[in-house]
Image (cartoon, rainbow, N blue to C red):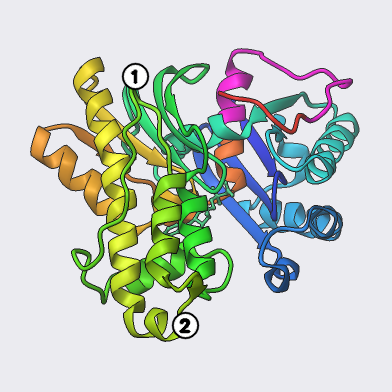
Amino acid sequence: MSITVLGIESSCDDTSAAVIRDGVLLSNVIASQDVHAEYGGVVPELASRAHQQNIVPVVDTALKRAGIDRHDLTAIAFTRGPGLLGSLHVGTSFAKGLSLGLRVPIVDVNHLHGHVLSHFIRREENDPVPEYPFLCLLVSGGNSQIILVRNYNDMEILGRTIDDAAGEAFDKCAKVMGLPYPGGPHIDRLAAEGDASRFKFAKPHIPGFDYSFSGLKTSFLYTLRDNLKLDPEFIEKNRADLAASLQKTIIDILMDKLDKAVRQTGVRTVAIGGGVSANSGVRDAVEQYCARRGLTAFIPPRVFTTDNAAMVAIAGYYKYLDRDFCRYDSVPYARTTI
Ligand code: KG4
């Protein structure tokens, strides 16, 4: 009998629902929230309310696009954390209610596991998936980690950021350049037209596999100021070169530790995930690095780099196969690691 899992994601500012049958994606619907744009960041209270508005139509659309009825569902997977608590409560409560109504089990998913496991979402039956063990560079607005993935439920963080995440470095530097939030995609776009060798920014010297991006942020800020004030004319004239140089520095920092992890573990497969893995420069760098060293690279389709329920559904699918269900008295968690 086939196994049909509904995934629900509501950890931050995207309400998403997806259906996966026997590991193959049938639908993935994402409602992004525009309400935050004018605030320059996600406002938790507004996010929770928007999830409340979106969740029923988003799930409904996901079921329709999958061509199934809700009674065809075998299990419901939902993001339990980490994320914004108010937002997580919406998805968690909805999943519990639907599961009780349909008499199918619920499966809780760690959002970070979801990002790592997004490489197992197959759009066609024969799509390739990574073999264990593999290394995953997880880079998002909140995380920069190198993870050794031994199995779907056995992941070890080899390195993590000790201050800002890579996405924060993109977003905060973009903000001082006057670019809209989130700045990562704007830097990506501008960088394509700029000279990456024009500016030199600080690179960290941290032992092991850990990352640091706060020094880069400070040195970027210092480049943009004139007599302790930001210099708008300078920024305007050098936008593309600043973006290209910033992006190159972030990529160099990411690749330096990734290379170290590859050498030390001897692992032959490298994957990337999280919002920053949508960055053209990061994608090219990982692909070229793997090609040079004869490694297998897994670069996710862009739709699976940011928050989506397809990754929740696939993570839930594997837990379901292990009968690893969630209790009804489980509550969301704001913070956790892998
Ligand atoms: O995984 P994600 O959607 O959620 C959070 O963890 O917040 O990642 C969002 C991050 C933001 O920092 C955003 O600027 C960054 O991913 N991002 C990018 C690109 N697309 C999204 N950064 C650089 N280049 C991009 N193309």
In three-dimensional space, the C-alpha distance between marks 2 and 1, rounded to whole angstroms, equals 49 Å
User: Quadrant location of residue 270?
Assistant: top left
The three-letter amino acid code for the residue at tag 2 is Pro
Image point 35% across, 68% down: which residue? 243
Image point 53% across, 76% down: which residue? 178
Earlier along the polypeptide chain: callout 2 or callout 1? 1
**How far across and down, in percent of the image, does residue 251 sit?**
30, 49
> Compared with residue 74, is residue 277 higher up or lower down, i.e. above or below?
below
Q: Is residue 125 visible?
A: no
Secondary structure of the residue carrying numbered label 2:
helix
Residue assigned mark 1: 132
Main SS of residues in magenta: loop
**How far across and down, in percent of the image, does residue 3 sit?**
61, 29
Q: Nearer the viewer, residue 163 or 281?
A: 163
Magenta stretch in the rendered image:
315-332
Q: Is residue 210 left or right of residue 255?
A: right
62 inside magenta stretch: no
322 inside magenta stretch: yes
The three-letter amino acid code for the residue at tag 1 is Tyr
Residue assigned mark 2: 232
**How far across and down, in percent of the image, does residue 268 sit?**
21, 24
User: Quadrant location of residue 7?
Assistant: top right
Q: Is residue 53 left or right of residue 69?
A: right
